[in-house]
Image: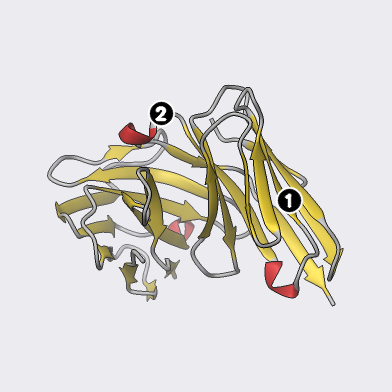
Amino acid sequence: GAVVSQHPSWVICKSGTSVKIECRSLDFQATTMFWYRQFPKQSLMLMATSNEGSKATYEQGVEKDKFLINHASLTLSTLTVTSAHPEDSSFYICSALGLAGGSSYNEQFFGPGTRLTVL
Amino acid sequence: QQPVQSPQAVILREGEDAVINCSSSKALYSVHWYRQKHGEAPVFLMILLKGGEQKGHEKISASFNEKKQQSSLYLTASQLSYSGTYFCGTEKGPLYNFNKFYFGSGTKLNVKP
Protein backbone atom coordinates (compact mmCIF):
# COMPACT_ATOMS: atom_id res chain seq x y z
CA GLY A 1 0.00 0.00 0.00
CA ALA A 2 0.91 3.64 -0.35
CA VAL A 3 3.17 4.89 2.43
CA VAL A 4 3.75 8.46 3.52
CA SER A 5 6.44 9.37 6.00
CA GLN A 6 6.98 12.50 8.04
CA HIS A 7 10.12 13.72 9.67
CA PRO A 8 10.63 14.47 12.46
CA SER A 9 8.01 12.67 14.53
CA TRP A 10 8.27 15.29 17.21
CA VAL A 11 10.23 18.45 17.80
CA ILE A 12 10.68 20.83 20.71
CA CYS A 13 12.04 24.26 19.92
CA LYS A 14 12.47 27.67 21.49
CA SER A 15 10.21 30.55 20.63
CA GLY A 16 11.45 32.51 17.64
CA THR A 17 13.19 29.64 15.87
CA SER A 18 12.11 28.01 12.61
CA VAL A 19 11.18 24.38 12.22
CA LYS A 20 11.05 22.36 9.01
CA ILE A 21 8.81 19.30 8.64
CA GLU A 22 9.22 16.91 5.74
CA CYS A 23 6.53 14.83 4.12
CA ARG A 24 7.52 12.07 1.70
CA SER A 25 5.55 9.66 -0.41
CA LEU A 26 7.71 6.55 -0.32
CA ASP A 27 6.36 4.30 -3.03
CA PHE A 28 4.34 6.56 -5.27
CA GLN A 29 4.48 9.98 -6.82
CA ALA A 30 2.19 12.65 -5.48
CA THR A 31 1.55 15.81 -7.42
CA THR A 32 -0.66 17.04 -4.60
CA MET A 33 -0.04 16.98 -0.89
CA PHE A 34 -2.03 18.51 1.92
CA TRP A 35 -0.96 19.97 5.24
CA TYR A 36 -3.24 19.82 8.26
CA ARG A 37 -2.99 21.07 11.81
CA GLN A 38 -4.74 19.43 14.70
CA PHE A 39 -5.08 20.89 18.19
CA PRO A 40 -5.87 18.60 21.12
CA LYS A 41 -9.34 17.09 20.99
CA GLN A 42 -10.14 18.92 17.78
CA SER A 43 -10.56 17.96 14.17
CA LEU A 44 -7.92 18.23 11.47
CA MET A 45 -7.94 21.64 9.88
CA LEU A 46 -6.69 22.00 6.34
CA MET A 47 -3.90 24.55 6.21
CA ALA A 48 -2.80 24.41 2.62
CA THR A 49 -2.70 22.42 -0.58
CA SER A 50 0.76 21.80 -1.95
CA ASN A 51 1.19 21.19 -5.67
CA GLU A 52 4.47 20.07 -7.16
CA GLY A 53 6.18 22.82 -9.08
CA SER A 54 3.79 25.59 -8.14
CA LYS A 55 2.88 27.77 -5.21
CA ALA A 56 0.84 26.31 -2.40
CA THR A 57 -2.77 27.30 -1.93
CA TYR A 58 -3.47 28.42 1.61
CA GLU A 59 -6.75 28.26 3.46
CA GLN A 60 -8.29 31.41 4.76
CA GLY A 61 -6.66 32.55 7.98
CA VAL A 62 -3.39 30.68 7.43
CA GLU A 63 -0.40 33.01 7.13
CA LYS A 64 1.65 32.27 4.03
CA ASP A 65 4.75 33.94 5.38
CA LYS A 66 4.62 32.03 8.61
CA PHE A 67 3.96 28.58 7.17
CA LEU A 68 6.21 28.19 4.17
CA ILE A 69 5.45 25.25 1.91
CA ASN A 70 7.77 23.91 -0.74
CA HIS A 71 6.80 21.00 -2.98
CA ALA A 72 10.08 20.57 -4.82
CA SER A 73 9.58 17.08 -6.18
CA LEU A 74 6.86 14.52 -6.77
CA THR A 75 7.75 12.77 -3.52
CA LEU A 76 8.60 15.56 -1.13
CA SER A 77 6.80 18.51 0.40
CA THR A 78 8.13 20.55 3.29
CA LEU A 79 6.40 22.79 5.78
CA THR A 80 8.53 25.37 7.57
CA VAL A 81 7.09 27.08 10.60
CA THR A 82 8.97 30.35 10.76
CA SER A 83 9.55 32.26 13.98
CA ALA A 84 7.56 29.69 15.91
CA HIS A 85 5.64 30.74 19.03
CA PRO A 86 3.93 28.69 21.72
CA GLU A 87 0.56 29.09 20.02
CA ASP A 88 1.99 27.22 17.01
CA SER A 89 2.38 24.11 19.13
CA SER A 90 0.22 21.48 17.51
CA PHE A 91 0.11 18.16 15.70
CA TYR A 92 0.94 18.69 12.03
CA ILE A 93 -0.15 16.00 9.58
CA CYS A 94 0.52 15.77 5.88
CA SER A 95 -1.23 13.64 3.31
CA ALA A 96 -0.39 12.73 -0.25
CA LEU A 97 -2.91 12.21 -2.98
CA GLY A 98 -2.60 9.00 -4.91
CA LEU A 99 -4.63 6.36 -6.65
CA ALA A 100 -6.17 3.93 -4.22
CA GLY A 101 -5.13 0.36 -4.99
CA GLY A 102 -7.26 -1.18 -7.72
CA SER A 103 -9.48 1.89 -7.90
CA SER A 104 -9.97 4.76 -10.28
CA TYR A 105 -10.28 7.44 -7.66
CA ASN A 106 -7.71 9.39 -5.73
CA GLU A 107 -7.33 8.84 -2.04
CA GLN A 108 -5.39 10.62 0.64
CA PHE A 109 -2.63 8.71 2.35
CA PHE A 110 -1.66 10.25 5.64
CA GLY A 111 1.71 10.60 7.23
CA PRO A 112 2.13 9.68 10.91
CA GLY A 113 2.19 13.31 11.99
CA THR A 114 4.71 15.62 13.67
CA ARG A 115 4.13 16.96 17.15
CA LEU A 116 5.56 20.45 17.51
CA THR A 117 6.10 21.98 20.93
CA VAL A 118 7.30 25.55 21.11
CA LEU A 119 8.65 26.63 24.47
CA GLN B 1 -17.70 24.23 4.77
CA GLN B 2 -16.91 21.76 7.52
CA PRO B 3 -19.43 18.90 7.72
CA VAL B 4 -21.25 18.41 11.01
CA GLN B 5 -20.93 15.18 12.94
CA SER B 6 -23.11 13.75 15.67
CA PRO B 7 -22.88 12.65 18.35
CA GLN B 8 -19.72 14.25 19.70
CA ALA B 9 -18.94 11.28 21.90
CA VAL B 10 -20.19 7.76 22.49
CA ILE B 11 -19.42 5.27 25.24
CA LEU B 12 -20.22 1.65 24.50
CA ARG B 13 -19.82 -1.75 26.06
CA GLU B 14 -18.07 -4.32 23.96
CA GLY B 15 -20.59 -5.94 21.63
CA GLU B 16 -22.94 -2.96 21.43
CA ASP B 17 -23.76 -1.06 18.25
CA ALA B 18 -23.23 2.61 17.38
CA VAL B 19 -24.19 5.02 14.62
CA ILE B 20 -22.26 8.15 13.72
CA ASN B 21 -23.76 10.75 11.45
CA CYS B 22 -22.18 13.27 9.09
CA SER B 23 -24.20 15.94 7.36
CA SER B 24 -23.71 18.88 5.04
CA SER B 25 -25.92 21.75 3.94
CA LYS B 26 -24.93 21.11 0.33
CA ALA B 27 -24.61 18.03 -1.85
CA LEU B 28 -21.20 16.40 -1.69
CA TYR B 29 -19.15 14.58 -4.28
CA SER B 30 -18.04 11.96 -1.84
CA VAL B 31 -17.76 11.06 1.81
CA HIS B 32 -14.69 9.45 3.35
CA TRP B 33 -14.62 7.90 6.80
CA TYR B 34 -11.49 7.76 8.97
CA ARG B 35 -10.60 6.54 12.43
CA GLN B 36 -7.85 8.19 14.43
CA LYS B 37 -6.18 6.82 17.53
CA HIS B 38 -4.67 9.27 19.97
CA GLY B 39 -1.41 10.73 18.70
CA GLU B 40 -1.61 8.92 15.38
CA ALA B 41 -2.60 9.84 11.85
CA PRO B 42 -6.11 9.08 10.59
CA VAL B 43 -6.66 5.67 9.06
CA PHE B 44 -8.92 5.38 6.04
CA LEU B 45 -12.01 3.21 6.52
CA MET B 46 -14.08 3.67 3.38
CA ILE B 47 -15.32 6.06 0.73
CA LEU B 48 -18.85 6.54 -0.60
CA LEU B 49 -19.32 8.07 -3.99
CA LYS B 50 -22.91 7.61 -5.08
CA GLY B 51 -26.20 8.73 -3.63
CA GLY B 52 -27.94 5.75 -2.06
CA GLU B 53 -24.70 3.81 -1.79
CA GLN B 54 -24.06 1.50 1.11
CA LYS B 55 -20.91 -0.45 1.76
CA GLY B 56 -19.16 -2.17 4.56
CA HIS B 57 -16.21 -4.20 5.70
CA GLU B 58 -16.61 -6.80 8.39
CA LYS B 59 -18.72 -5.14 11.07
CA ILE B 60 -18.30 -1.52 9.98
CA SER B 61 -20.56 -0.17 7.27
CA ALA B 62 -21.66 3.19 5.93
CA SER B 63 -24.40 4.74 3.85
CA PHE B 64 -24.73 7.88 1.74
CA ASN B 65 -28.23 9.22 1.28
CA GLU B 66 -29.83 9.87 -2.10
CA LYS B 67 -29.35 13.62 -1.93
CA LYS B 68 -25.69 13.12 -1.00
CA GLN B 69 -25.93 15.44 1.95
CA GLN B 70 -25.80 12.94 4.78
CA SER B 71 -23.78 9.85 5.58
CA SER B 72 -23.89 7.45 8.49
CA LEU B 73 -21.27 5.05 9.81
CA TYR B 74 -22.54 1.89 11.50
CA LEU B 75 -20.42 -0.01 13.99
CA THR B 76 -21.89 -3.40 14.79
CA ALA B 77 -20.94 -5.58 17.75
CA SER B 78 -18.20 -3.13 18.69
CA GLN B 79 -14.77 -4.34 19.72
CA LEU B 80 -12.24 -2.69 22.00
CA SER B 81 -10.13 -1.91 18.95
CA TYR B 82 -12.90 0.31 17.59
CA SER B 83 -12.11 2.96 20.19
CA GLY B 84 -10.86 6.19 18.72
CA THR B 85 -12.14 9.34 17.09
CA TYR B 86 -14.08 8.95 13.88
CA PHE B 87 -14.03 11.65 11.26
CA CYS B 88 -15.96 12.03 8.08
CA GLY B 89 -14.24 13.90 5.30
CA THR B 90 -15.90 15.54 2.36
CA GLU B 91 -14.86 16.84 -1.00
CA LYS B 92 -16.33 19.89 -2.64
CA GLY B 93 -15.23 18.99 -6.12
CA PRO B 94 -15.11 16.03 -8.48
CA LEU B 95 -12.65 13.32 -7.66
CA TYR B 96 -10.59 13.98 -10.73
CA ASN B 97 -10.11 17.52 -9.50
CA PHE B 98 -9.44 16.74 -5.88
CA ASN B 99 -8.37 20.03 -4.40
CA LYS B 100 -10.38 20.62 -1.26
CA PHE B 101 -11.00 18.27 1.57
CA TYR B 102 -12.66 19.06 4.88
CA PHE B 103 -12.94 16.94 7.96
CA GLY B 104 -15.98 16.84 10.22
CA SER B 105 -15.79 17.76 13.86
CA GLY B 106 -15.17 14.18 14.95
CA THR B 107 -16.94 11.64 17.16
CA LYS B 108 -15.02 10.11 20.02
CA LEU B 109 -15.90 6.48 20.53
CA ASN B 110 -14.91 4.67 23.71
CA VAL B 111 -15.56 0.94 23.85
CA LYS B 112 -15.31 -0.56 27.32
CA PRO B 113 -14.97 -4.22 28.28
Q: Find residue B93 and name its label.
A: 2
Residue A82, image x, y percentages: 28, 56
Q: Residue at x 77, y 46 (%)?
A: B7
Q: Nearer the viewer, residue A52 or B81?
A: B81
Tell me which numbered mark, 1 or 2, is placed earlier along the sequence. Answer: 1
Residue holding disc 1? B74
For the residue carrying disc 2, how many other residues have a C-alpha within 10 Å: few (<14), some (14-19), or many (20+)? some
The kind of residue on which mark 1 rests is Tyr
In the rendering, which numbered label is found on residue A8?
none
**Residue B10 on image: x %, y %:** 80, 56
Indicate the secondary structure of the residue bearing disc 2. Answer: loop
Instruction: Judge depth for marks 1 and 2 and give the one in front.
Output: 1
* Image coloring type: secondary structure
At which x and y percent is residue B38? 60, 69
Residue drawn at the location 75% of the way across and 71% of the way down: B79
Q: Residue at x 35, y 59 (%)?
A: A84
Residue in the foreground of this view, choosing between A6 and A100? A100
| In the foreground, B69 or A91 | B69
| B73 w.r.t. A18: above or below | above
